[in-house]
Image (cartoon, coloured by chain):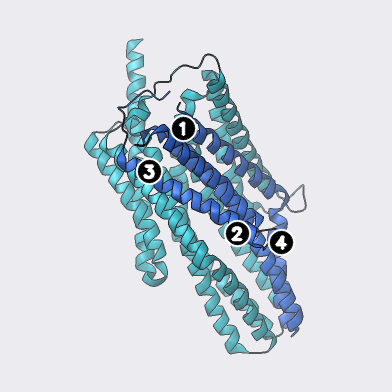
Chain colours: A blue, B cyan
Amino acid sequence: MSEARRFLILGGIALAILGMSYGLWYAVFAEHQALDGIGSSLATGFSAAAEKNSAAAQAALDQYREAKYRYDRQVDAHGHWIGLGMLLIVLGIGFDRLGFSERIKMLLARGLLAGAVLFPLGVLMQSSSHGPLPRAVAIVGSGLVIVSLAGIALGCARGDTSSPSPAG
Amino acid sequence: MLVLGGIGLILAGMIFGDIFAVFVLHQNAAHVGASLSAAAHAALAGDAPTVLASFQNVGGFLENRGTKVDTHVHMIDFGYLALMLAILQPWVGFGERARRRLAGVFLIGAVLLPVGVFLIHYVGLLYAPLQYIGWASIFADFGGLLVLVVTLAYLGGLFKRSGGATDTAVVDHLLAERGAPARLLLAGGVLFVLIGFLHGAYYAAVDLYRHEALDYSILSEMSAGAAGNNTAAVESSLGNYGQLQGDKAVKIAAHAHIIEFGILAILLAFFQPYVGLSDRWRRRWALLLLLGSLLLPVCVLLELRGGMIAGGLADFGGLLVIVALFAMWVGIVRYTGALDAAAREAR
């Protein structure tokens, strides 16, 4: 197994395991409470509106916005880590077909893995901070994934420069 | 085991998704809209108990929708993972019996989680041992744990083999396949994944924060309208909220589906030597799969403007993918059946 291919496959499985572990923890310890919080703040807001208490309604909707913002990002991080992990595995399996040198393949593999770790991490960081750093991490991560993927698509188009060889 | 189980899971997940899209999704969205409208009108009339009752209904409908989406997504994703792990088997440094057991446990977990998630809406907290978590959730989480443990074991097996002194070159003819159907699926798959990522980046940059701000401002207008007895403001907010939810749903669904279909196409490219059909038929099924994979997300995106026609075409795209995938599954069954027959004859 070539170095770049091994790097992507092992990295992809590790990333999928990270996403699954996080998802399992979230489902057991946080998700039900988060959904309860979203539902109850929305119901409280409209109940306050029924009592013609605009200030209380607004306060409850502010809570709803914050709870929904956090929930969406926590679920997105879980889904994207696993999805990107699987993408890394599947691209790793066919990585030797790219029409690039080993050095470029390794560069693409590193860029893809770094992006696949950083992008959901940035999204997850947004659930605890509204500052610019989490967004910057997510943007850098997604940029790395897209650029690396474009490189891999180009490598696919160029095709395998070697003849079919054993996969080992 | 992993190949047939994986494709079976993907097929089951897709058929479930198609049934869900046709018979549940739109009706459910209408129920959510009607319950939200009832809550807003109750708030307008100053009827707080009806507001709470309506929101309980909204919660029930959203749970029904959410658990079905999760069932669909997890079944397909576990199918993909099974296929990938199947390809990696030659590099896993365990004996045949251990690998077979791991595959069995993986498939049990991969079925248990989506079935458990599906049952959450129906079982609820009946005889629940915990405050928030019912038995269906517990079984679903246990299924997830099984999949997680097996994936960890496979990772250990890969490390064991790649670090072992007995490491020898593995000859895998699957990965040496260079036929036209495999090339078509590989190139199409990578292209779809790239398009999906670009669309996701565009959505994050242009729509995500706008949608979140709109979600909050529309609900605020609705509640302020109800508190101020302004019926027109409530009605207008309800209409805007429905449109926003629709816009959000189609964009996220298009993004997710094109990437998932891209990964599926890449995976199926590797399995083409196992598809016991003529080259011409393998090329036809590959083209049909790519056509359906493109048709579904594009038509989902057009659903808000194209209405039922776009929705119908999207469902048709999903059907094309299912048919092509089923044809390849049959091809793999034919191939493995022929291998078994040859082995029996040799004995």
**CB under 8 Å between discs 1 and 2:** no
Q: Secondary structure at mark 3?
A: helix
Residue type beneath disc 2: Arg
Please tell me which of labels 4 and 1 falls first in the chain: 1
Q: Nearer the viewer, mark 3 or mark 2?
A: 2
Q: Nearer the viewer, mark 1 or mark 3?
A: 1
Residue ranking furthest to the front? A103
Q: Nearer the viewer, mark 2 or mark 4?
A: 2
The residue nearer to you, when weighing B272 against A62, is A62
Are marks 4 and 3 in one subunit? no
Please report, as a chain letter, where disc 4 is located: A
Q: Secondary structure at mark 2?
A: helix
Disc 4 from disc 3: Cα separation: 39 Å
Disc 3 from disc 2: Cα separation: 32 Å
Which numbered circle lies on residue A5? Answer: 1
Are marks 4 and 1 in one subunit? yes
Is residue B60 at all visible to an observer of this figure? yes
Disc 4 from disc 1: Cα separation: 44 Å
